Amino acid sequence: MKKLLFLLLGTFICFSQSNRFIYEVTSKKDSASQNLMKENFNLDTTPDDIAYYNRFYYINDSLFAAKNQYGYKGYKLTSFLIKKNNSNEYQNYEYIGDVNFYKINEKSEQHWKISDSTKTFGGYQVQKATTQFGGRNWVAWFSKDIPIPYGPYKFNGLPGLIMELYDGKKDYYFKVIKSEKIQDSYKRISLENSVSRAISTNQAKLDKLKLELYDSPFKYILNGRLVLTEGKKLELEDGTILTKEQLKPAEANERKKIKSFNNPIELDKAVKYP
């Protein structure tokens, strides 16, 4: 990893370059389970903004550039973040499983306590910092050698890139595994498509929508807003295949999954389902 990052050190000391840091994210979506999910997320830093998003989007865009077609097995819509460099607000684009993305503008500030503790991570000396954010206690290890004041998700404000981050319960663990220069030709086509149709809202309204979706998990198909044509089937994230006739009987099981997968990064925003 040191070699990968070293190639960029000479270019991103000023913020005129566009670079991408890839985080491996291990998370426990169900706090009562021992099952862990592992995903890769991109943190793009450009002269205009920063963007944090699931690498699914990047792969989808790469496929479009190479073959002029979208989609690959495993692709799915997920929430993402964008922050303009002239703003202190993040645009949180949240996908909750219906037909729309919802956008919330919000500030994200952490009050860090920087420790004298250091260690080596990926060949770099990193320094420890701690904070409380989103109802969790966090430990970050950042590198002053990479003077970018950001990290995964909404974490920011340290005098160097956050290379490793985890909460006190280890429900979430982030680490940089790779870096690369963003090619001038790269366009965030998939993200921009979601941005263009996002509906502005606030946290209270978003929580209300999540509760409505819990009450009727397949309402956007059952009420006709999403069309499941004759003979077509719906594949859920866990691989379950359902016909339109099977949706109503499957609601109870889907509610159970929604309620169990309620361990977000910002724990204080967890929805209180009935």
Image (cartoon, rainbow, N blue to C red):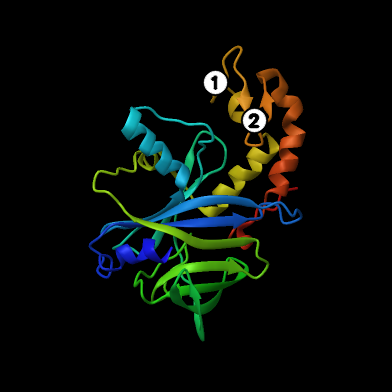
Which dot marks residue 227?
A: 1
Q: Amino acid at mark 1?
A: Val
Q: Which mark sits nearer the N-terminus, 2 or 1?
A: 2
Q: Nearer the viewer, residue 145 or 88?
A: 145
**Residue at image point 57% right, 38% down:** 97
Q: Amino acid at mark 2?
A: Phe
Extreme residue toward the top, this view: 230
Is residue 88 visible in the rendered image? The answer is no
Picture quadrant where residue 83 is located: bottom left
Is residue 224 visible in the rendered image? The answer is yes
Is 248 rendered above or below residue 170?
above
Is 7 rendered above or below residue 140?
above
Residue 229 in percent (x, y) is at 56, 15
Q: Secondary structure at mark 2?
A: loop
Task: Find the distance from the CA under tag 2 to the CA under tag 1.
Answer: 11 Å
Picture quadrant where residue 11 is located: bottom left
Q: Bin the neighbour count of mark 2 within 10 Å (Cα to Cα): few under 14, some 14-19, many 20 and up.
A: some
Q: Bin the neighbour count of mark 1 within 10 Å (Cα to Cα): few under 14, some 14-19, many 20 and up.
A: few
The residue wearing badge 2 is: 218
**Quarter that holds the N terminus:** bottom left
Residue 23 in percent (x, y) is at 48, 57
**Residue at image point 68% right, 48% down:** 261
Residue 91 is left or right of residue 65, and the answer is right
Residue 66 is left or right of residue 165, and the answer is left
Is 247 rendered above or below residue 47?
above
Extreme residue toward the bottom, this view: 116
Residue 108 in percent (x, y) is at 46, 66
Extreme residue toward the front, this view: 3
Picture quadrant where residue 147 is located: bottom left
Q: Secondary structure at mark 1?
A: loop
Q: Nearer the viewer, residue 180 or 69?
A: 180
Q: Nearer the viewer, residue 146 or 53?
A: 146
